[in-house]
Image (spheres, rainbow, N blue to C red):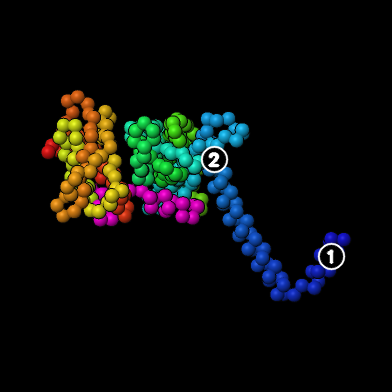
Amino acid sequence: MISGFWRLQSRGHSRGTQWRGARLCRLLGLAFAAWCAWAAVAASSPLLSTSRSAPGGGRETPGQVRLFPAGRDEATGRYRAVAEIALADGYKTYWREPGDSGVPTTFDWAGSGNVADVQVRYPAPERFFDGSGHAIGYLRTVRFPLEVAPAAAGRPVELRLDVDFGVCREICIPEQATVTATLSDIVQIAGLWEDAVALLPATVEPGETASGVAVASGSLDGDSLRLSIAGDIGEGGDVFVEGPPGWQFGRPQREARSMPGGGTVFIVPVRHPAGAGPADLTVTVTVTGGVRPVETRLRIGAP
């Protein structure tokens, strides 16, 4: 009955109807191909729960990790991906330097295939009080752009990331997740890479201005680091300092007087190894509060 009905309808087709049918088939084919590309990305980007709570029972998952392929840079040959830590409402996670307390977010790709190197970029953090001190991290879902150099060009990369991080509401919970993805010349998720990169600090040299802000100078006097920041970072602006192993930098305080010509001076408490001084010290300074965060590697001298 069905085949007879189809023959009856077919005899009545006009050329216009046949053209429309062929066009519809092509459109359906394109739609199916796009769905297959999306499905390939989704299949290679597993969502892993990182809650230590048993599933069920109405208990929420504080943090989840995902890994998204994001195409390839034609100029460098490096593949792109984005690692995401998705946080439940009210939870926080930490930067690479967690502050007074917390667990630094770190990435390990030793289990990957055809990987020579991975560059992980961290968005600028925020400072927050976590009940026992001032921690440094993220108050909402955060995405980390990854640039992956293949060991052998022209072959796909099997990227495996082991992520160690912490989530907290009232107390810090150490977490670990493993995510995997195959990186190749697949169609990237539109806007994913660009949106993640837009939140990164601009990397500039000492004294070089980006979005009207510059790390002008720094000097170490005993247990205090004095940083001069040129430009307007507003009342909510902050500085985050990272140094060599053994060096610790506390919560900065603004100096009452401004820099000549505008700008802000911060005094940062320092704990350093015995006998270490300015000649031993190069720090990374991240400044927030301007149009865009700024990151600078700065050689520290004596006052």
- Residue type at mark 1? Phe
Residue at the right extreme of this rendering: 1
In this rendering, the answer to whether 121 lies above or below 192 is above
Q: Quadrant of residue 147?
A: top left
Examine the rendered structure and indicate whether residue 11 appears above or below residue 209.
below
Q: Looking at the picture, which amino acid does disc 2 mark? A: Leu
| Residue at x 72%, y 72% (from the top left corner) | 17
Front position in the image: 10 or 264: 264
Most common SS among magenta residues: loop
Disc 2, SS:
loop
Residue 254 place in picture, x, y as percent: 22, 43
Q: Position of residue 43 (x, y in %)?
A: 57, 44
Q: Is residue 213 left or right of residue 186?
A: left
Give the magenta range.
188-213
- Foreground pick, 39 / 155: 39
Looking at the image, residue 130 sits to the left or right of residue 257; the answer is right
Residue holding disc 2: 47
| Residue with the most extreme left position | 303
Q: Is residue 210 magenta?
A: yes
Indicate which disc, 2 or 1, sits on the residue closer to the N terminus.
1
Determine if the magenta segment contains residue 117. Answer: no
Residue 179 visible in the displayed image = no
Splitting the image into 4 quarters, where does residue 22 fall? bottom right
What residue is rendered at 17% in x and 47% in y? 257
Percent across and percent down for residue 204 are 26, 49
Which class describes the residues within 10 Å of circle 2: few (<14), some (14-19), or many (20+)?
A: some
**What element does badge 1 sit on?**
helix
Point out the residue furthest to the top here.
274
In this rendering, does residue 14 appear at all? yes
| Mark drawn on residue 5 | 1
Residue shown at 59% from the left, 33% from the top = 55
